[in-house]
Image (tube, rainbow, N blue to C red):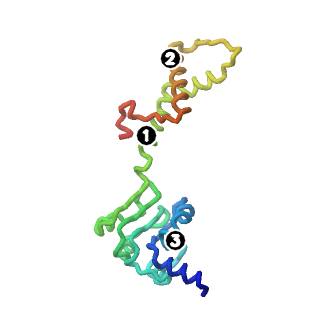
Amino acid sequence: MAMEDKHNLKDNKELQPLLVFGPPTIFPIFEAQNSHNYRFIKAFSSQISLHQFLTQQKVDPSSIQAILCNPVQKVTADAIRLLPSLRIIVTSSAGTDHIDLVECSRHSIQVVSAAGDHAGDVADMAVGLLLDVVCKISAADRHVRKWGPSMPFNLSFGSKVLLLILLLLLSMHVLFKHGVSVSCKCFRSPIST
């Protein structure tokens, strides 16, 4: 074994092991950016039991404190009991149906999911789409964009409402052009809180 290989093996054993059950879609990027922080134990690539896999990889089950998973592969009670030092399970999905939450609760294991990560943004988008449909903002925008310099300004189908929509479109265009985000909080909506 070359000197460089021995050095890498030594560094690899000193890294904190991170057990990966069914990798999230961003796993290749995460692995590339964090390969110097963690020793990734890819259990998703094996068809044997977790205990046999860890033995084959020469990993002490008590050294694993974290699991990274997706909904494809379940994190069962047996897997949780096998890892006595496990403290956190991170899933890339919004749901946690694939994780035995009762067993996690018994062992005081924290479960982190992507459920609340973008909830405010989703609520903002939903209210924006609702306003778009109710006020026909997209239809008004298409109508305005069809106007050319030679076309007359014709308000034949809803004068004041159309004028308000045009002003709203113009103000939204200015706000978004300059990178200012519009939030549901300005409507005092309980959706995004």
Tell which circle, 1 or 2, labels the residue nearer the N-terminal end.
1
> Within the image, what quadrant is residue 6 found in?
bottom right
Any mark on residue 161, and which?
A: 2
Q: Residue at x 54, y 63 (%)?
A: 33
Tell whether label 2 touches label 3 (CB within 8 Å).
Answer: no
Q: Among all residues in the image, which is located at the extreme bottom?
A: 1
- The residue wearing badge 3 is 44
Mark 2, Cα crowd under 10 Å, few <14 / some 14-19 / many 20+, is: few
Residue 129 vertical position relative to residue 31 in the rendered view, above or below: above
**Where does the image place residue 35, in percent across and percent down from the top left?**
52, 68
Q: Earlier in the sequence, mark 3 or mark 2?
A: 3
Mark 1 or mark 3: which comes first in sequence?
Answer: 3
Q: Which residue is mark 1?
A: 123
Count of residue discs? 3
Amino acid, disc 2 = Val
Mark 2, secondary structure of its residue = helix
Please state the horizontal and vertical placement of residue 22, each as a whole percent of the image. 50, 66
